[in-house]
């Protein structure tokens, strides 16, 4: 027997609400229920941090009450510096009250959104969370030498294991976060790389015609995969044997002309075009997930993303543990990749990038075991949604 239109509409609405509840949160609405954080909430929106928080699946916000925010505003930071200061109070992992008191060995370093801005030098964008005497939990910048001025006050809202809003007693201070910050128009790709373990690759870019192509794509969308210094230094003998045009092609192979967040990479496995792609020159690689790891398979080498240097839509820079070797220049070890998904823009490697391939071996360059920031969290569980959809369609069929 068919179901009534009212029942069908009710079931459909419930299904859509269930899907929405598994995939979305709104930090502005969460904090709006707590007027003691109204100033903090206001500046999350003004600095556009609220939107960045909302697009992440797993997040912990260390909320500051109005008097604490007044003390910050009295320092008259620019809006860009204020964004860095507040970004240090947004952790890209879930920490509820229970988890705070169950930290392994009593202390941990949590990556903040400031770490992903590219402004944080080294690991200065990490927050030290430590269980202290009598159940107190202290929060401090990574380089605080064990001195804590900010402590856990209370849980404001918790949605395990996606969103947690905790009040802390004082702002977390960091010289790096409070340093004068240039606006987005002053974005310098190679400087960000050099400060965070990719100086060798940055030096290659600075000396190459490829840098102009990277810079041209920043405003419209750019994803860069930057090999670590160890990986590049181990690869340099092979690099020096390439022709000038081949060097340009190889460097452009490390860029994709669209913005791809870590969450997007985890949910969109498949072949991907690069800045080196032009006509018959495929210069693509395959994104393949392995649990939480995101691997880039070129048919010559497989590299893994081991950190995020900066993530500010429309551009993002990741650190990878190997130099990406295109099969157009090196001996392929596997069958050709599947057809790549289209990118919104294509840039030529060089007018002569299709010159004869170098006869380089297919061995991998040295790995770097990096304990770096995996900045974004896992995406929506598609199998769960399909089960729900199946149940819904089954009800309709009754």
Image (spheres, rainbow, N blue to C red):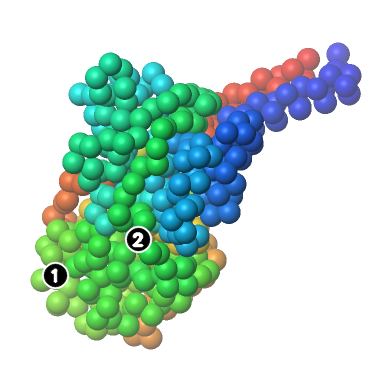
Front one among 286 and 263: 263
Residue 330 appears in which quarter of the rendering? bottom left
Is residue 25 visible to the viewer in this orientation of the structure? no
Specify the quadrant of the image occupied by residue 151: top left
Which percent across, then down, holds residue 293? 33, 41
Residue 207 visible to an observer of this rendering: yes
- Residue identifier under label 2: 179
Using residue 282 as the reference point, say whether residue 303 is left or right of it.
left
Q: Residue at x 39, y 18 (%)?
A: 98
Secondary-structure class at tag 2: loop
From the image, which quarter does the C terminus lie in? top right
Image coords of residue 268 (percent x, y): 48, 47
Looking at the image, which residue is at 28% across and 75% down? 205
Give the foreground label among 1 and 2.
2
Report x, y in % for residue 377. 43, 39
Whether 173 is drawn above or below 386: the answer is: below
- On residue 236, the disc is 1
Q: Position of residue 48 (x, y in %)?
A: 55, 53
For the residue carrying disc 1, how many other residues have a C-alpha within 10 Å: few (<14), some (14-19), or many (20+)?
few
Q: Residues within 10 Å of mark 2 (few under 14, many from 20)?
A: some
Say if 256 sits above or below 42 in the image.
Answer: below
Identified at 49% across, 52% down, the residue is 73
């Amino acid at each position: 027997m068919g179901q009534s239109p009212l029942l069908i509409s009710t079931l459909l609405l419930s299904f859509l609400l269930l899907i929405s509840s598994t995939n979305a949160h709104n930090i502005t609405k969460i904090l709006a229920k707590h007027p003691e954080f109204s100033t903090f909430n206001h500046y999350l929106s003004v600095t556009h941090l609220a939107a960045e928080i909302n697009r992440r699946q797993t997040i912990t916000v260390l909320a500051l009450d109005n008097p604490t925010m007044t003390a910050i505003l009295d320092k008259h930071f620019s809006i860009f510096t204020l964004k860095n200061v507040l970004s240090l109070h947004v952790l890209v992992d879930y920490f509820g009250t229970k988890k705070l008191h169950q930290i392994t060995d009593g202390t941990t370093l949590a990556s903040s959104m400031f770490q992903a801005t590219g402004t944080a030098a080294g690991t200065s964008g990490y927050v030290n969370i430590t269980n202290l005497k009598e159940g107190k939990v202290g929060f401090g910048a990574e380089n605080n030498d064990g001195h804590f001025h900010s402590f856990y006050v209370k849980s404001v809202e918790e949605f395990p294991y996606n969103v947690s809003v905790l009040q802390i007693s004082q702002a977390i201070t960091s010289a790096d976060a409070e340093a004068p910050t240039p606006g987005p128009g002053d974005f310098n790709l190679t400087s960000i790389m050099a400060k965070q373990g990719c100086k060798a690759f940055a030096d290659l870019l600075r000396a190459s015609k490829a840098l102009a192509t990277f810079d041209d794509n920043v405003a419209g969308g750019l994803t860069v995969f930057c090999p670590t210094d160890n990986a590049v230094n181990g690869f340099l003998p092979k690099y020096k044997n390439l022709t000038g045009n081949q060097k340009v092609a190889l460097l452009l192979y490390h860029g994709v002309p669209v913005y791809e967040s870590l969450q997007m990479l985890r949910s969109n496995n498949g072949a991907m075009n690069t800045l080196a792609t032009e006509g018959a020159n495929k210069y693509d690689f395959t994104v393949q997930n392995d649990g939480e790891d995101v691997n880039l398979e070129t048919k010559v080498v497989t590299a893994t993303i081991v950190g995020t240097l900066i993530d500010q839509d429309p551009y993002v820079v990741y650190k990878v543990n190997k130099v990406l070797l295109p099969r157009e220049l090196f001996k392929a070890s596997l069958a050709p990749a599947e057809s790549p998904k289209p990118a919104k823009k294509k840039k030529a490697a060089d007018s002569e990038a299709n010159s004869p391939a170098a006869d380089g071996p297919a061995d991998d360059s040295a790995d770097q075991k990096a304990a770096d920031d995996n900045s974004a969290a896992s995406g929506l569980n598609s199998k769960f949604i399909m089960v729900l959809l199946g149940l819904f369609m089954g009800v309709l069929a009754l």
